[in-house]
Image: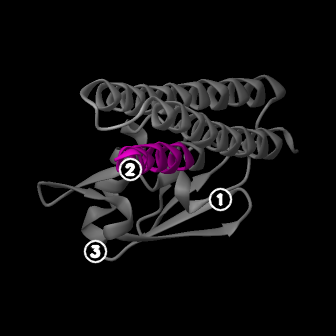
Amino acid sequence: MLDKILADAKPKMEAGIEHFKDELRSIHTGRASSSLVDDVMVSYYGNSTPLKQVASVTTPDSNMISIQPWDKGVLGDIELAIRNANLGFNPINDGHQVRIVLPPLTEERRKEYVKTVGQKAEVVKITMRNARKEAWDKIQSSQKSGELTEDDKYRGEDRLNKLIDDYNKQIEELSKKKEKDIMTI
């Protein structure tokens, strides 16, 4: 029973880590990356479609993103979607492709991004704590109903705490790596 409760908590924690990784990919580090525009949704013939499904996104150099649509008729929609996504980019439509030239980051902007990383890390840690609390509540109720012994309850608490510590270490490592990328000029 204890193993099942812990096994049920793990996917929620893994999902939190994966979401955090996705959030970190969308934070600008000063270098061009196609992941900066991955979440942009384009109005494609009346349907909201991810950018990567209507165009090829490449990074020809470290400060430019090039978006080559498969259908030239969607160029204006791509440009509009990027502007409306509030990414801080100014797309350039040359009639064949949309280019985004990334401006160099100022020290102040880099510090803002580092602060954003910290905020996103805290949100995912709260998610982890909520998953831990849910699992702990299940362990306690199972112990009260007689499905688990008191020893199992405390063994479960130790395993749950170790699990949370492992995930928190992952979050810290990911945060530090991203902060280093942001602050590297």
Residue 75's place in the image compared with 7, above or below, is: below
Q: Amino acid at mark 3?
A: Asp
Pick the front one: 153 or 10: 153
Q: Residue at x 42, y 28 (%)?
A: 136
Q: Residue at x 28, y 53 (%)?
A: 42
Q: Residue at x 53, y 43 (%)?
A: 20
Magenta-tinted stretch: 1-22
Q: In what element is the residue under mark 1?
A: strand
Pick the front one: 20 or 98: 20
Majority secondary structure of magenta residues: helix
Q: Position of residue 145 (x, y in %)?
A: 24, 28
> What mark, if any, has residue 40 been given in the picture?
2
Position of 161 with respect to 47 (left or right) is right
Along the polypeptide, which appears first: circle 2 or circle 3?
2
Q: CA distance from mark 1 to mark 3?
A: 21 Å
Indicate which label's residue lies in the foreground, 1 or 2.
2
> Quadrant location of residue 32?
bottom right
Disc 1 target residue: 64
Residue 65's place in the image compared with 109, above or below, is: below
Pick the front one: 178 or 69: 178
> What mark, if any, has residue 71 been given in the picture?
3
Along the polypeptide, which appears first: circle 1 or circle 2?
2
